[in-house]
């Protein structure tokens, strides 16, 4: 998207639910779903209850993305660093991934969601790997929304993986450029994220899409992920519309 003029920035259009939606909808939104643990702690619940609430919330946000016309949503569900969490929490997060596939796949497929995975699946159980692969296969022709689930994902690990693949393919150094490296990222030919949202008020990128996010706009929402609802997403889109994206160019 080119830089927006002042008049463009002020424009809104009605969303299907009647409320105003900003004119420019980002094609690709990525979310760091942070704050589940603190949300649970505030309620005297175990951390995994926060992750469960966060999973419920994902439904509302997925629906809102389709409604708002966002074409790609990338969510950070499990990082390469998350293996260092207590075993019960790691197991709980694996279980959530399995439950989401078992319980939600049919509905996601019906809604036209194309499921993709980014990250390294080899570290998870063979059974779960199979489930993920089947879900990807089943939904591969859907085109309403691409949902990239970053699971056992790390931005640096992704870059290392890309370099290894490029070397294996035997590319000459002169043939390696940014477009080629991008194609070897897990997101392949998908457009880079336009907007990266992090909930819970933390101001870090935490190794998320560090290659693809080079020119993304960042929005930090002051609420924990389970409380990030459709209105919060709308607010993020309004902020996105107020930004002047120049991609390093002069005004
Ligand atoms: C960060 O909050 C959140 C995570 C590490 C997990 C996010 C996972 C989900 C919302 C479940 C959806 C999963 C799938 C597979 C679809 P935190 O635990 O770091 O929160 P804290 O900073 O408050 O402790």
Image (cartoon, rainbow, N blue to C red):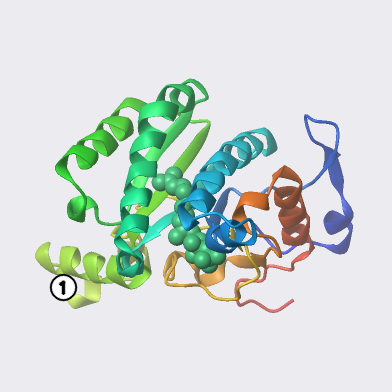
- 148 vs 200: above or below: above
Horizontal relation, residue 18 to residue 82: left or right:
right
Residue 54 x/y as whole percent: 55, 48
**In this orientation, which residue lies closer to the viewer: 239 or 26?**
239
Q: Residue at x 61, y 50 (%)?
A: 226
Residue 196 is drawn in which quadrant? bottom right
Circle 1 SS class = loop
Q: Residue at x 50, y 45 (%)?
A: 52
For the question of whether residue 5 can be seen, the reply is yes
Q: Residue at x 63, y 37 (%)?
A: 60
- 214 vs 103: above or below: below
- 23 vs 242: above or below: above
Residue 28 x/y as whole percent: 55, 51
Horizontal relation, residue 98 to residue 43: left or right:
left
Quadrant for the N terminus, please: bottom right
Residue 31 x/y as whole percent: 55, 56
- 208 vs 24: above or below: below
Q: Residue at x 77, y 54 (%)?
A: 235
Please state the total of marks drawn on the protein image. Answer: 1
Residue underneath mark 1: 172
């Amino acid at each position: 998207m080119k830089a927006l003029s002042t008049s463009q920035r002020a424009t809104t259009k009605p969303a299907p639910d009647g409320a105003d939606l900003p004119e420019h909808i980002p094609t690709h939104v990525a979310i760091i779903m942070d704050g589940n643990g603190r949300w649970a702690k505030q309620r005297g619940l175990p951390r995994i209850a926060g992750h469960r609430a966060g999973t419920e919330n994902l439904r509302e946000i997925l629906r809102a993305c389709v409604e708002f016309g966002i074409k790609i949503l990338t969510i950070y569900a499990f990082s390469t660093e998350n293996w260092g969490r207590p075993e019960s929490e790691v197991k709980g997060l694996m279980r959530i991934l399995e439950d989401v596939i078992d319980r939600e796949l049919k509905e996601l497929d019906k809604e036209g969601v194309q499921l993709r995975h980014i990250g390294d699946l080899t570290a998870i159980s063979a059974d779960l790997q199979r489930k993920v692969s089947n879900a990807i296969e089943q939904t591969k022709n859907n085109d309403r929304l691409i949902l990239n689930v970053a699971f056992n994902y790390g931005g640096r690990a992704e870059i290392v993986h890309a370099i290894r693949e490029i070397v294996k393919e035997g590319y000459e150094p002169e043939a390696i450029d940014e477009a080629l490296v991008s194609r070897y990222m897990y997101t392949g030919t998908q457009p880079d994220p336009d907007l990266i949202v992090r909930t819970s008020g933390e101001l870090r990128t935490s190794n998320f899409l560090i290659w693809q996010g080079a020119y993304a706009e960042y929005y930090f929402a002051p609420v924990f992920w389970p409380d990030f609802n459709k209105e919060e997403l709308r607010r993020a889109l309004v902020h996105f519309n107020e930004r002047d994206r120049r991609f390093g160019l002069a005004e």
